[in-house]
Amino acid sequence: QVQLVESGGGLVQAGGSLRLSCAASGSSFSINVMNWYRQAPGKQRDLVATITSGGNTNYADSVKGRFTISRDSAKNTVYLQMNSLKPEDTAVYYCNAKVITLPSLRRLEVWGQGTLVTVSS
């Protein structure tokens, strides 16, 4: 069983910054890819940023240049540094991981519980 726990959400003014964290815990596993998604009220859940086990990153066009995803593999933790926040960034942010359990090599997709980010204008 693998669990993801997010933290770091909150209320911030437009132009401000927040850093989200997502820590993975559980029995033996290896993480391939970690993602951040977000879901605004009444909208679908969208992919925001991705980081692979090799450190390759990818971003949605709407956040490029403002958000940075990073990971501490030793701590099984992924971060999302969000700068120059806009009201349209307001959403529940979800951490997602694609993992392989050890030694069974079973592939799992795991979601966190979400953390709310509110950006006021």
Image (cartoon, rainbow, N blue to C red):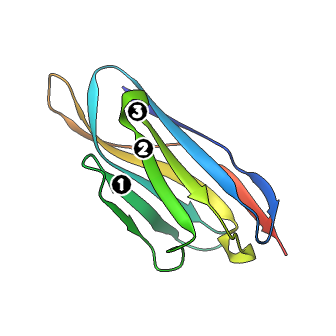
Distance of label 1 from label 3 (alpha carbons): 12 Å
Q: Which mark is residue 51?
A: 1
Q: In this view, does 12 lie to the left or right of 47?
A: right
Task: Tell me the element at label 3.
Answer: loop
Residue 2 lies left or right of residue 95; in this view the side is left
Q: How far apart are marks 3 and 2 (CA)?
A: 7 Å
Task: Give the percent coordinates (x, y) of residue 89.
Answer: 66, 70
Rendering coords of residue 28 (x, y %) = 28, 21
Q: Which amino acid does label 1 sit on?
A: Ile
Q: Which mark is residue 107?
A: none
Who comes first in sequence, dot 3 or dot 2? 2
Disc 1 to disc 3: CB gap under 8 Å: no
Residue at 14% x, 31% y is: 105
- Residue mark closest to the camera, 3 vs 2: 2
Image point (60%, 48%), residue name: 20
Name which of mark 1 and mark 3 comes first in the sequence: 1
Task: Mark 3: give few (<14), some (14-19) or many (20+) Cα within 10 Å.
Answer: some
Q: Residue 71 carries which label?
A: 2
Residue type of the residue flagged with mark 2: Arg
Marker count (numbered): 3
Q: Kindly indicate whether the residue at mark 2 contacts the one at mark 1 (C-beta within 8 angstroms).
A: yes
Q: Is residue 118 above or below residue 114?
A: below
Residue under numbered circle 3: 76
Q: Quadrant of the C terminus?
A: bottom right
How far from the left and from the top, in percent, is residue 62? 53, 79
For the residue pair 120 and 103, the one nearer the viewer reads as: 120
Where disc 2 sits, the SS reads: strand
Visible residue check, residue 113: no
- Tell me the CA gap for discs 1 and 2: 8 Å
Residue 103 visible? The answer is yes
